[in-house]
């Protein structure tokens, strides 16, 4: 399970929006083995006046917040960061303009399929990446 929110300033992605999100999803699948069916990929494009960038960052600054179940190794997380940065380079996002925040939650904090706790549905399969 992975819920992704990518935030950018609006306008520069144009028709590349789906590909941009799918690139992040591909990095999740490649490094953490999160299948596409277990991913929710969202994009928020902000008006320039609604997103104040950190000092020294460019117009393609991208903030990515990923909520996923806890249990991945530090090595796997670092591989994810590298994979996302590499894939976003295809969209001309400079490596220094990518910020990734992981939010890890236990299976009991995830509800799916009509309010059922994920661990009750056999989703508590342990994460070994």
Image: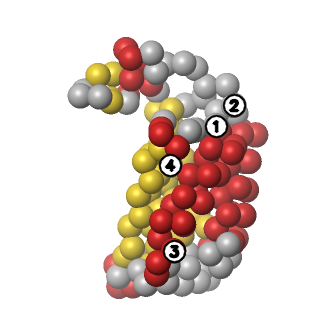
Earlier residue among tags 4 and 1? 1
Q: Secondary structure at mark 1?
A: loop
Rendered location of residue 46, percent (x, y): 37, 76
Q: Name the side, left or right, on which 46 lies relative to 106.
A: left
Q: Look at the numbered discs 1 and 2 and tell me whether their residues touch, using CB distance below 8 Å.
A: yes
Residue placed under numbered mark 4 in the picture = 66
| Distance from the alpha carbon under mark 2 to that under mark 4 | 16 Å
Q: Residues within 10 Å of mark 3 (few under 14, many from 20)?
A: few
The residue indicated by pointer 1 is: 33
- Within-10-Å neighbours for mark 2: few <14, some 14–19, many 20+: few
Residue indicated by mark 2: 129
Q: Is residue 61 above or below residue 111?
A: below
In-image side of 91 versus 59 (left or right): right
Residue 80 position, x and y percent, is 68, 49
Element on which disc 2 rests: loop
Work out how far the residue at label 2 is from the one at label 3, CA to CA, in angstroms: 30 Å
In the picture of the structure, the residue carrying the numbered disc 3 is: 16
Q: Earlier in the sequence, mark 1 or mark 3?
A: 3
């Amino acid at each position: 399970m992975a819920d992704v929110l990518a935030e950018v300033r609006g306008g520069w992605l144009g028709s590349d929006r789906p590909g941009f999100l799918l690139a992040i999803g591909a990095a999740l699948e490649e490094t953490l083995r999160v299948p596409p069916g277990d991913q929710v990929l969202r994009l928020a494009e902000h008006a320039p006046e609604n997103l104040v960038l950190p000092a020294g960052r460019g117009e393609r600054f991208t903030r990515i917040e990923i909520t996923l179940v806890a249990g991945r190794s530090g090595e796997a997380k670092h591989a994810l960061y590298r994979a996302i940065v590499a894939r976003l380079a295809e969209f001309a996002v400079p490596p220094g303009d990518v910020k990734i925040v992981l939010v890890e939650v236990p299976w009991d904090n995830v509800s799916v399929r009509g309010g059922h706790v994920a661990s009750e549905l056999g989703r508590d399969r342990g994460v070994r990446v």
